[in-house]
Structure formats: C-alpha cells, structure tokens
Amino acid sequence: MSEELRQNLALLCSYHPSIAEVCRRLEINRQQFNKYLAGNSHPSRRNMRRICDFFGVSEAELLLDPRQFEDIVALKRKPIQQEALSKQLLHLDRLYQQSQDLEKYLGYYFRYFYSFGNQGKIIRSLALIYREDNKYYWKNIEILRDPETGRSNGLNKYEGVLFYLADRLYILEYEAIEVNTITQATFYPSHRNRIGLLLGIQTGGPTRRGRKPGASKVALEYLGRDINVRQAMKRTGLFDPGDGSVRSEILSLIENTIEPSSFVLDVDEP
C-alpha cells in the first residue's frame, strides 16, 4: 500500500468523530480498516470504491501527494461547511427579520430575580443591551457576592441575543465562561417615554447545586446609557429580601407565587 494512500486516508478520517463510526458507515471490518491506516494492506477494488464514494473523492485524488490532496479536501469541504453554517443561522435570521426596533432599550439595567441556586436570596446583576451591525445583543454579569462580608463565591457571565416580536421582548442567553446553561426570558415592553421597569418570566437552571430546571419572575430596572459601570457593579450581589437592599416595589414584582386557580407561573402586564 502506498504511503500517499495511507496518509490521505488518515486525513479523511480526521474529519469524523471516530474511526469506529467511519467503519460502521462504510460497513468495513474495523480490523481490516486499521490495516489500511497502518499501510499494511491495500483496499480491494470493491472497498476502494466504497471509500471513495463515502468520502467524496476519486481514486486518483486519493493517491495524490498528501500536501496536494489536503488542499483539494479543504476546497471540497469549504462549501459544505458554509452551507451547514447557513442552516444553523437560518432560524436566527428569520427572527431578526421579524424583530421590531429596539433602539429605545439600549443601555444598562439592574436585573432582579430570586436565585435558582441560593434559596431565598435575590440576585441583582448588571446587564447591557447594545447594538452591532443593526442587530441587538445582551450581556449580563452576576457576581454572587455576600453583601455583609463583600466576599464573592461565584461569577457568571452571560451573552445572548434580543428580539422584539409581537409586542414582547425575548432574550436568549448562555453562560459564556463555562458554556453550560441557557436561559430564555420574555418581557413586556415599555410604552412610556422613560423605560423604568421591565417585567417578565425567565426559564433555565442554576449553574451549580444540582442544575434543576426552574422558572422565576424577573425585573429589569433601567439605569441609562451612560453610567458609572464600576459603581453599578459594586451594587450587585446576593441579597436577603428583608434587609432593605431591594426596594419593596421590586420585591412585590418578582415574588414567585402561583394563585390557587393557576397552574403556571405568570406575570401581569404593568
């Protein structure tokens, strides 16, 4: 078996999760295929045709110099990768096309909700809505800091996208440090000149303590477009609802109660 065929076959296999998967899809015995990869055996005419058809190359290409073959494979895969990426972005593009203008919502917010992972505590985090290339994005930083000691026992950074569809604001975010959780939030929009508070429901799960899925009421308090970020960050952390750190108005808005006649957690429009 030629060295070119051995190296080129190994390159093609590197684009797949495992050799075992390649053998399974080719319906070629793993032990026999390993002999091809080791250069100890040459594929039969039938197996060579299987291999070429599976990887989308010709037999002549498979016998080329490895450097030349690598260039050919890269060119062949490029449109496939672009097509796959366009399929992934298709759904987001459809949402962006339908989304209404979010210009008035640009700026910084305090985000309030009862912590999923710290029972009975309220999280106040700092969030930002910003625009790039006529699309709207979201950032949120949670510092799980004890207000009494000032010590932090955790940091979560979230990034995501923002849509305004059918008179509702939608935020889809993911934890950007460990990339281990997704949160989706739905808010009522503001129909006033000054935004004030935005109310909604969010679903997701804690990044720690069992990762049990849950839902909670959530409030965004608008701070403005030009603020002292350092000072705002000092006001974030974990708070006891009874210590006076969070206004009573906000406490009443984010209380997670379900009325006897209800079966789901919801929030009334302000």
Image: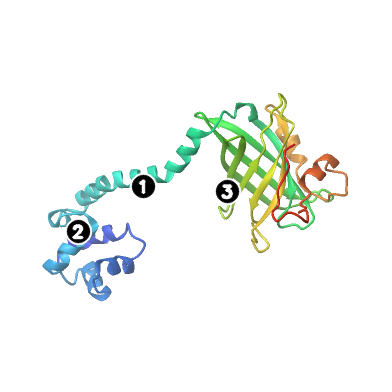
Tell how many labels: 3
Where residue 154 appears, as percent x and y from the top left, is 69, 53
Q: Which residue is mark 3?
A: 174
Q: Which is more N-terminal, label 1 or label 2?
A: 2
Q: Residues within 10 Å of mark 2 (few under 14, many from 20)?
A: few
Badge 2 marks a residue whose secondary structure is: helix
Helix, strand or loop for disc 3: strand
Nearer-the-camera pick, 57 or 41:
57
Residue 120 sits in quarter:
bottom right
Q: Amino acid at mark 3?
A: Tyr
Q: Which mark is residue 84?
A: 1
Q: Amino acid at mark 2?
A: Asp
- Local SS, label 1: helix
Disc number for residue 53: 2
Q: Kindly check if marks 2 and 1 are in contact, taking CB atoms under 8 A apart as contact.
A: no
Q: Is residue 71 left or right of residue 49?
A: right
How many C-alpha atoms fall within 10 Å of the one at disc 3: few (<14), some, or many (≥20)?
many
Residue 3 is labelled as: none
Looking at the image, is mark 2 or mark 3 earlier in the sequence? 2
Quadrant where the C terminus lies?
top right
Residue 148 lies left or right of residue 98; in this view the side is right
- The structure residue drawn at horizontal position 23% and vertical position 61%, both measured from the top left corner, is 9
Structure colour scheme: rainbow
Give the quarter of the figure containing the N terminus: bottom left
- 143 to 53, vertically: above or below: above
Please provide percent x and percent y for residue 112: 74, 44
